[in-house]
Image (tube, rainbow, N blue to C red):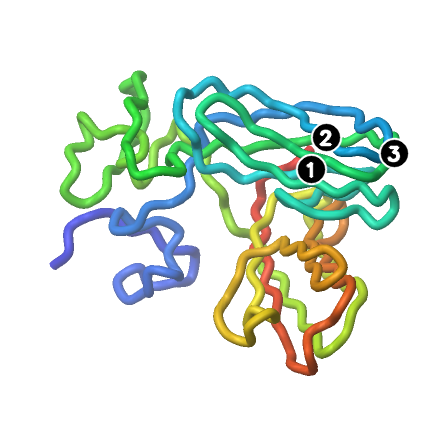
Protein backbone atom coordinates (compact mmCIF):
# COMPACT_ATOMS: atom_id res chain seq x y z
CA UNK A 1 0.00 0.00 0.00
CA UNK A 2 1.27 3.46 -0.91
CA UNK A 3 0.71 6.02 1.81
CA UNK A 4 -0.20 9.58 0.95
CA UNK A 5 -3.07 11.62 -0.37
CA UNK A 6 -4.86 11.18 -3.69
CA UNK A 7 -7.86 13.14 -4.96
CA UNK A 8 -9.57 12.20 -8.23
CA UNK A 9 -12.08 14.15 -10.34
CA UNK A 10 -15.76 13.29 -10.11
CA UNK A 11 -16.41 9.99 -11.88
CA UNK A 12 -12.80 8.74 -11.73
CA UNK A 13 -11.87 5.86 -9.41
CA UNK A 14 -9.11 7.24 -7.19
CA UNK A 15 -7.79 3.71 -6.49
CA UNK A 16 -6.97 2.98 -10.13
CA UNK A 17 -6.50 6.46 -11.65
CA UNK A 18 -3.17 7.28 -13.26
CA UNK A 19 -1.27 10.20 -11.73
CA UNK A 20 -2.06 12.41 -14.74
CA UNK A 21 -5.79 11.90 -14.15
CA UNK A 22 -5.75 12.95 -10.49
CA UNK A 23 -6.66 16.40 -9.17
CA UNK A 24 -4.03 16.01 -6.44
CA UNK A 25 -1.47 13.42 -5.38
CA UNK A 26 1.13 13.79 -2.66
CA UNK A 27 3.58 11.88 -4.86
CA UNK A 28 3.82 14.76 -7.35
CA UNK A 29 4.37 18.46 -6.81
CA UNK A 30 2.51 21.22 -8.68
CA UNK A 31 3.12 24.88 -9.53
CA UNK A 32 2.20 26.94 -6.47
CA UNK A 33 1.72 30.70 -6.58
CA UNK A 34 3.46 32.79 -3.93
CA UNK A 35 2.38 36.20 -5.29
CA UNK A 36 0.87 37.91 -8.33
CA UNK A 37 2.45 41.08 -9.72
CA UNK A 38 0.74 43.46 -12.15
CA UNK A 39 1.81 46.66 -13.87
CA UNK A 40 1.10 48.81 -16.91
CA UNK A 41 3.69 50.46 -19.15
CA UNK A 42 3.84 52.72 -22.18
CA UNK A 43 6.32 51.88 -24.93
CA UNK A 44 7.29 55.06 -26.81
CA UNK A 45 9.08 55.18 -30.14
CA UNK A 46 10.36 52.38 -32.35
CA UNK A 47 13.62 51.75 -30.47
CA UNK A 48 14.29 49.22 -27.74
CA UNK A 49 13.24 49.92 -24.16
CA UNK A 50 13.47 47.87 -20.95
CA UNK A 51 10.79 47.90 -18.25
CA UNK A 52 11.13 46.51 -14.72
CA UNK A 53 8.88 44.95 -12.08
CA UNK A 54 10.48 44.50 -8.66
CA UNK A 55 9.85 41.24 -6.78
CA UNK A 56 12.44 41.71 -4.01
CA UNK A 57 12.78 38.01 -3.14
CA UNK A 58 16.57 37.78 -3.13
CA UNK A 59 16.48 34.80 -5.51
CA UNK A 60 15.30 34.23 -9.08
CA UNK A 61 11.85 32.63 -8.94
CA UNK A 62 10.13 30.43 -11.46
CA UNK A 63 7.17 32.28 -12.95
CA UNK A 64 4.38 32.41 -15.53
CA UNK A 65 4.38 35.70 -17.42
CA UNK A 66 1.58 37.25 -19.50
CA UNK A 67 1.50 40.52 -21.46
CA UNK A 68 -1.64 42.23 -22.71
CA UNK A 69 -1.84 44.35 -25.87
CA UNK A 70 -5.33 45.60 -26.76
CA UNK A 71 -7.63 42.74 -25.70
CA UNK A 72 -5.20 39.83 -26.04
CA UNK A 73 -2.97 38.25 -23.40
CA UNK A 74 0.26 36.78 -24.79
CA UNK A 75 3.15 34.88 -23.17
CA UNK A 76 6.65 35.76 -22.05
CA UNK A 77 7.85 36.69 -25.52
CA UNK A 78 6.03 37.56 -28.69
CA UNK A 79 4.91 40.02 -31.31
CA UNK A 80 1.54 41.72 -31.56
CA UNK A 81 0.46 41.88 -35.23
CA UNK A 82 -1.55 45.09 -34.85
CA UNK A 83 0.91 47.30 -32.98
CA UNK A 84 4.07 45.39 -34.11
CA UNK A 85 5.28 45.47 -30.49
CA UNK A 86 7.84 42.76 -29.75
CA UNK A 87 8.97 41.71 -26.28
CA UNK A 88 10.85 39.20 -24.18
CA UNK A 89 10.95 38.78 -20.39
CA UNK A 90 13.47 37.44 -17.89
CA UNK A 91 14.16 37.54 -14.15
CA UNK A 92 17.06 37.88 -11.70
CA UNK A 93 17.33 37.96 -7.90
CA UNK A 94 15.50 41.29 -7.55
CA UNK A 95 13.45 42.12 -10.66
CA UNK A 96 11.53 40.98 -13.69
CA UNK A 97 12.57 42.64 -16.95
CA UNK A 98 10.59 43.20 -20.13
CA UNK A 99 12.55 44.31 -23.17
CA UNK A 100 10.35 45.79 -25.91
CA UNK A 101 11.10 46.99 -29.40
CA UNK A 102 9.06 48.43 -32.29
CA UNK A 103 5.44 49.27 -31.59
CA UNK A 104 5.91 53.06 -31.54
CA UNK A 105 3.60 54.26 -28.74
CA UNK A 106 1.90 51.21 -27.24
CA UNK A 107 0.23 50.72 -23.86
CA UNK A 108 0.63 47.21 -22.46
CA UNK A 109 -0.16 45.41 -19.20
CA UNK A 110 1.81 42.62 -17.54
CA UNK A 111 0.68 39.98 -15.07
CA UNK A 112 3.25 37.74 -13.43
CA UNK A 113 2.43 34.66 -11.38
CA UNK A 114 5.47 34.30 -9.12
CA UNK A 115 5.87 30.66 -8.16
CA UNK A 116 7.11 29.26 -4.88
CA UNK A 117 9.86 27.35 -6.66
CA UNK A 118 13.14 29.01 -7.56
CA UNK A 119 14.68 28.97 -11.01
CA UNK A 120 17.80 27.39 -9.45
CA UNK A 121 18.34 24.34 -7.22
CA UNK A 122 18.64 26.14 -3.89
CA UNK A 123 15.71 25.89 -1.48
CA UNK A 124 15.06 29.43 -0.28
CA UNK A 125 14.10 30.11 3.31
CA UNK A 126 10.41 30.54 2.57
CA UNK A 127 7.61 28.88 4.45
CA UNK A 128 3.97 29.28 5.37
CA UNK A 129 4.07 30.89 8.82
CA UNK A 130 0.34 30.64 9.54
CA UNK A 131 -0.35 27.19 10.99
CA UNK A 132 -4.03 27.16 10.06
CA UNK A 133 -5.19 25.34 6.95
CA UNK A 134 -4.10 22.16 5.16
CA UNK A 135 -0.54 21.36 4.16
CA UNK A 136 0.61 18.28 2.25
CA UNK A 137 4.34 17.71 1.99
CA UNK A 138 6.35 15.79 -0.56
CA UNK A 139 7.25 12.16 0.27
CA UNK A 140 9.87 11.97 3.01
CA UNK A 141 9.49 15.62 4.09
CA UNK A 142 8.20 16.52 7.54
CA UNK A 143 5.08 18.62 6.91
CA UNK A 144 5.65 20.54 10.16
CA UNK A 145 9.01 21.91 8.99
CA UNK A 146 8.60 21.82 5.19
CA UNK A 147 9.48 24.89 3.18
CA UNK A 148 6.93 26.10 0.64
CA UNK A 149 8.90 24.46 -2.17
CA UNK A 150 8.65 21.09 -0.40
CA UNK A 151 4.88 21.14 -0.21
CA UNK A 152 2.67 19.39 -2.72
CA UNK A 153 -0.27 21.50 -1.60
CA UNK A 154 -1.02 24.28 0.87
CA UNK A 155 -4.36 26.03 1.29
CA UNK A 156 -2.55 29.37 1.50
CA UNK A 157 -0.71 28.82 -1.78
CA UNK A 158 -3.00 29.17 -4.84
CA UNK A 159 -2.38 26.77 -7.73
CA UNK A 160 -3.20 26.49 -11.42
CA UNK A 161 -6.29 24.41 -12.12
CA UNK A 162 -6.77 22.96 -15.60
CA UNK A 163 -10.23 23.52 -17.06
CA UNK A 164 -9.84 23.12 -20.84
CA UNK A 165 -7.32 21.68 -23.30
CA UNK A 166 -7.28 23.29 -26.74
CA UNK A 167 -5.68 21.41 -29.64
CA UNK A 168 -4.46 22.94 -32.90
CA UNK A 169 -2.79 21.48 -35.99
CA UNK A 170 -0.77 23.19 -38.70
CA UNK A 171 0.40 21.48 -41.89
CA UNK A 172 2.85 23.57 -43.89
CA UNK A 173 0.72 26.64 -43.30
CA UNK A 174 0.65 29.97 -41.56
CA UNK A 175 -2.17 32.02 -40.12
CA UNK A 176 -4.34 32.24 -37.03
CA UNK A 177 -6.62 29.61 -35.53
CA UNK A 178 -8.88 29.90 -32.49
CA UNK A 179 -10.80 27.66 -30.11
CA UNK A 180 -13.58 29.05 -27.91
CA UNK A 181 -12.87 28.34 -24.24
CA UNK A 182 -16.31 29.39 -22.93
CA UNK A 183 -15.01 30.92 -19.69
CA UNK A 184 -16.11 34.51 -20.21
CA UNK A 185 -12.75 35.94 -19.10
CA UNK A 186 -9.16 35.79 -20.41
CA UNK A 187 -7.54 32.75 -18.75
CA UNK A 188 -3.93 31.92 -17.98
CA UNK A 189 -2.48 29.11 -20.08
CA UNK A 190 0.62 27.11 -20.96
CA UNK A 191 1.33 25.58 -24.37
CA UNK A 192 3.61 23.05 -26.08
CA UNK A 193 4.40 22.29 -29.72
CA UNK A 194 5.35 18.91 -31.15
CA UNK A 195 7.44 18.10 -32.95
CA UNK A 196 9.94 20.95 -32.83
CA UNK A 197 9.54 22.39 -36.37
CA UNK A 198 13.18 23.48 -36.43
CA UNK A 199 14.45 19.91 -35.96
CA UNK A 200 11.48 17.63 -36.65
CA UNK A 201 11.83 15.90 -33.27
CA UNK A 202 11.14 16.71 -29.65
CA UNK A 203 8.68 19.03 -27.96
CA UNK A 204 9.15 22.73 -27.23
CA UNK A 205 7.20 25.22 -25.09
CA UNK A 206 5.35 28.10 -26.71
CA UNK A 207 5.48 30.95 -27.50
CA UNK A 208 8.38 30.54 -29.90
CA UNK A 209 9.84 33.52 -31.74
CA UNK A 210 12.60 33.27 -34.31
CA UNK A 211 11.99 36.59 -36.01
CA UNK A 212 11.38 36.37 -39.78
CA UNK A 213 12.05 32.63 -39.74
CA UNK A 214 9.55 30.76 -37.61
CA UNK A 215 7.11 32.24 -35.12
CA UNK A 216 4.42 30.63 -32.96
CA UNK A 217 2.33 32.90 -30.75
CA UNK A 218 -0.37 31.86 -28.27
CA UNK A 219 -2.92 34.25 -26.77
CA UNK A 220 -6.18 34.38 -24.85
CA UNK A 221 -9.04 36.86 -24.57
CA UNK A 222 -12.55 36.78 -23.11
CA UNK A 223 -13.72 34.28 -25.72
CA UNK A 224 -10.90 32.37 -27.36
CA UNK A 225 -7.56 30.67 -27.10
CA UNK A 226 -5.64 31.52 -30.25
CA UNK A 227 -2.50 30.33 -32.02
CA UNK A 228 -0.82 32.37 -34.75
CA UNK A 229 1.95 31.09 -37.01
CA UNK A 230 3.96 33.67 -38.92
CA UNK A 231 6.89 33.76 -41.34
CA UNK A 232 8.20 30.46 -42.72
CA UNK A 233 5.77 27.63 -42.06
CA UNK A 234 6.83 24.10 -41.13
CA UNK A 235 8.46 22.26 -44.01
CA UNK A 236 5.51 20.13 -45.03
CA UNK A 237 5.03 18.22 -41.79
CA UNK A 238 2.10 18.50 -39.42
CA UNK A 239 2.75 20.04 -36.03
CA UNK A 240 0.40 19.92 -33.05
CA UNK A 241 -0.08 22.70 -30.52
CA UNK A 242 -1.62 21.75 -27.18
CA UNK A 243 -2.75 24.59 -24.93
CA UNK A 244 -3.63 23.82 -21.32
CA UNK A 245 -6.10 26.45 -20.15
CA UNK A 246 -6.30 27.31 -16.45
CA UNK A 247 -9.18 28.85 -14.56
CA UNK A 248 -6.87 31.61 -13.27
CA UNK A 249 -8.23 34.91 -14.57
CA UNK A 250 -5.76 37.31 -16.18
CA UNK A 251 -8.23 40.15 -15.59
Q: Helix, strand, or loop for circle 2?
A: strand
Mark 3 packing: few (<14 Cα in 10 Å), some, or many (20+)? some
Q: Helix, strand, or loop for circle 3?
A: loop
In the rendered structure, the answer to whether residue 176 lies left or right of residue 204 reads right
Image x and y of residue 58, in percent: 40, 20
Mark 3 or mark 2: which is in front?
A: 3
> Which residue matches tag 3?
104
The residue positioned 62% from the left and 74% from the top of the image is: 239
Relative height, residue 46 to residue 14 (above, below)? above
Quarter-of-image position of residue 222: top right
Residue 242 versus residue 50: which sits nearer the camera?
A: 50
The residue positioned 19% from the left and 32% from the top of the image is: 143
Q: Are marks 1 and 2 in contact (CB under 8 Å)?
A: yes
> Which residue matches tag 2?
109
Quarter-of-image position of residue 72: top right
Relative height, residue 231 to residue 88 (above, below)? below
Mark 1 or mark 3: which is in front?
A: 3
> Which residue matches tag 1?
67
Q: Helix, strand, or loop for circle 1?
A: strand
Residue 206 versus residue 180: which sits nearer the camera?
A: 206
Residue 29 versus residue 233: which sits nearer the camera?
A: 233
Mark 2 packing: few (<14 Cα in 10 Å), some, or many (20+)? some
The residue positioned 78% from the left and 69% from the top of the image is: 174
Of labels 3 and 2, earlier in sequence is: 3
Report, in whole angstroms, how far the alpha carbon at label 1 lies from the one at label 2: 6 Å
Residue 92 in sight here: yes
Image x and y of residue 195, in percent: 55, 72
In the rendered structure, the answer to whether residue 63 lies left or right of residue 239 reads left
Amino acid sequence: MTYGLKVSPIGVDVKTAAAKDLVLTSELSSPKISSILTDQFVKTGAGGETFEVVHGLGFAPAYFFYLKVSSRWYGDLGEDPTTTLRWVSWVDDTKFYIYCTDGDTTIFDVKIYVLVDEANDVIAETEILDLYGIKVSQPGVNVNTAKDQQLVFGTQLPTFKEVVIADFQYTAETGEKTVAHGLGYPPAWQAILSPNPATGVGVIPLPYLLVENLEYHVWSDDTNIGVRVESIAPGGETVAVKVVVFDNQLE
